[in-house]
Image: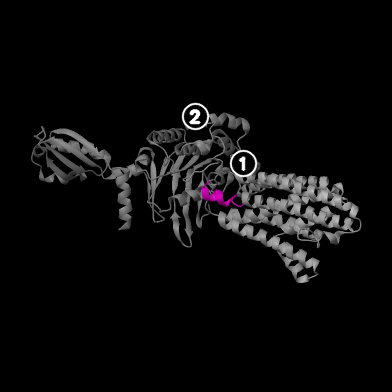
Amino acid sequence: MLAIETHELTKTYQGIGGCQGISLAVPQGSIFGLLGPNGAGKSTLVKMLVGLLHPTAGEAKILGKPIGDVTARKRVGFLPENFAYHDWLTGKDLLRFHASLYGLGKSEAIQRIPQVLTRIGLKDQRGKKIGDYSKGMQQRIGLGCALVADPDVLFLDEPTSALDPIGRKDVRDLLVALKAEGKTVFINSHLLSELETVCDQIAIIKESRLIFQGDWREIVNKGTRVKVITGKQPLPQEINASGGFNLVSHRDLSSTGESNSKLQELIFTCPAGNSIPLLVEHLVQKGFQIHEVTPITDSLETMFFQYISNSTE
Amino acid sequence: MLNIARLTFMEVSRKKIFMVTIVLSLIFLLLYGVTLERAAEDMSRMKDMGGQQMIIHQVIGSQLLGLGLYFASMLLALLSLMASVGSVASEIESGLLHAIVSKPIKRSDIVLGKYFGYGLMLSSYALVLFSGVMAINYLYNANVLSLLTGPLLVYGALLFALQPLILLGVAMVFSTLTRTLTAGIISFTLYGLGMVGGFFEQIGGMISKSSLVNIGIFTSLVIPSDALFRKVVSIINGNQDNPFSALTAGPFGSTVPPSNAMLVYTGIYILGCILLSIYNFKKRDL
């Protein structure tokens, strides 16, 4: 069973904007990143999935149940992008209130709340009023509200927007820990570098439509580039033809003024990540002395910009 | 629903507008008490004049009682509208409801919880205010309450406490439908319409002008807050049994007491407001 499943999910405003025809499949126990430029429809999609917006068309299921189903929502946590909470309540009281919204019993809440406070790093501030919290602390308590019922699926809309670098790292560690516990995390964020470190799969939305969905590492590894430092020797004619490798760059390191003046740098594109040993074997057969082999992996950012610009053309 | 109602009740009691209204209420009750005390002194001086003092007592006393209840009702209306008009709209605008609506709770429970939280607080406040006004009248204006029995007093108090529920219902309908400012403007306009319609109806009753009475009846159908107030006044004045009931006429009196059918209509009106608020909120995109 998928954690989140949407089929042609659409939300438009007078026929335009929002998001259109979104079909997603998010496996359980994964961290799924939702990317897209501002106004692409990311928040619209998240809001539909958590029941804040009514879809114009299509359908969506969470843990096999329709999005409006109350039993499914018992297993869902949500941190809104524009988080706002009752500022006159203390952090502990707020968690108690949200626990009651989940239908948690008093004893269950008493047991659960200290765990959550520890997890979000607000144990010592539990008696402080929300109004006296910093922006980052408010975002943390929002995360606590989402986690208080130990949900199986967690929707986080820009979860680190108000956090400092330490807070961001804490959240990243928390996400990894949640994944290890088998939870599914669906993140909407602009911070590509953060998604890159934690996400298994991503979806990219542009101008209300889904333009990519899948394992981003698989994509960037598809056309792996490899930098090879070899001893300096003439390049044979057939080096490009064998094994699907393509030499795309050749540089004599003696011209750089470096101490390794008898070396050269070759950059190849390979059909897949596991073809690197074949390339090395091939070069050795051709008599090259191999000094260094480094795969060059594209970042999520590079891939994101490629998709965004390609879909424009 | 109960957790929302409890939180709402606590929240209203913390709002500045509530504290301001409490202070204004105390000032009002103090001034009202002083006025009635002075009036009572004047009345006792008039005792020896003979002749018409009984009628004068009744006319002035009724007007003072009506005035007290009217201003208490106005204070109550201000608090009801100002506290509740943003109950849903402002929480949508601030994002406060986003984390709540996404929880496993029905949207209808959120509306009902808010309605009962505000309703309990406002009705309790209404009873305190009503008790204050009546206590002052028992102290300094007891003649006018000579026909008021215990059951009628309780009945009047309950109807008085029902007033904020009408305005709360109206405010919730618009709060679930529009933005806070719009909801506020519409709700206050409707309340004002009810007030003006009520005055028209009383004046129409005094000068036997049916067109003015009909305008009053029409506005009572649009918003029955003023009609309910007139009903309270007629009960407190004991209009049905009072041989001087005609003397209670005036802007704060009740020359044309609303029928019991109007009370049934008020009940249906409140229920309709709650159902409409639920419908609006269920349909609304946040």
Residue A111 visible to an observer of this rendering: yes
Q: Chain of mark 1?
A: B
Name the one closer to the observer, A6 or A126.
A126
Give the side of residue B119 with respect to residue B38, left or right. left
Residue B274 appearing in the image:
no
Q: Percent x, y for residue A289?
A: 13, 33
Question: Residue A271: x percent and y percent?
Answer: 25, 44
Pointer 2 residue: A118
Q: Helix, strand, or loop for circle 1?
A: helix
Q: Quadrant of residue A274?
A: top left
Q: Which mark is residue A45?
A: none
**Identity, as a three-letter code, of the amino acid under mark 2:** Thr
Question: Do the dots labelled 2 and 1 sit on one chain?
Answer: no
Which is nearer the eye, B29 or B204?
B29
- The count of marks equals 2
Residue type beneath disc 1? Arg
Q: Residue at x 63, y 60 (%)?
A: B189
Provide the residue designation for mark 1. Answer: B14
User: Disc 2 is attached to a residue of which chain?
Assistant: A
Q: Measuring 49% from the left and 29% from the top, which residue is drawn there? A: A118
In the image, is residue A106 above or below residue A62? above
* Crowding near the residue tagged with mark 1, few <14, some 14–19, many ≥20 C-alpha atoms within 10 Å: few
Magenta residues (range): B85-95
Q: Residues within 10 Å of mark 2 (few under 14, many from 20)?
A: few
Say what secondary structure mark 2 lies in.
helix
Residue A245 pos. (x, y %):
20, 44
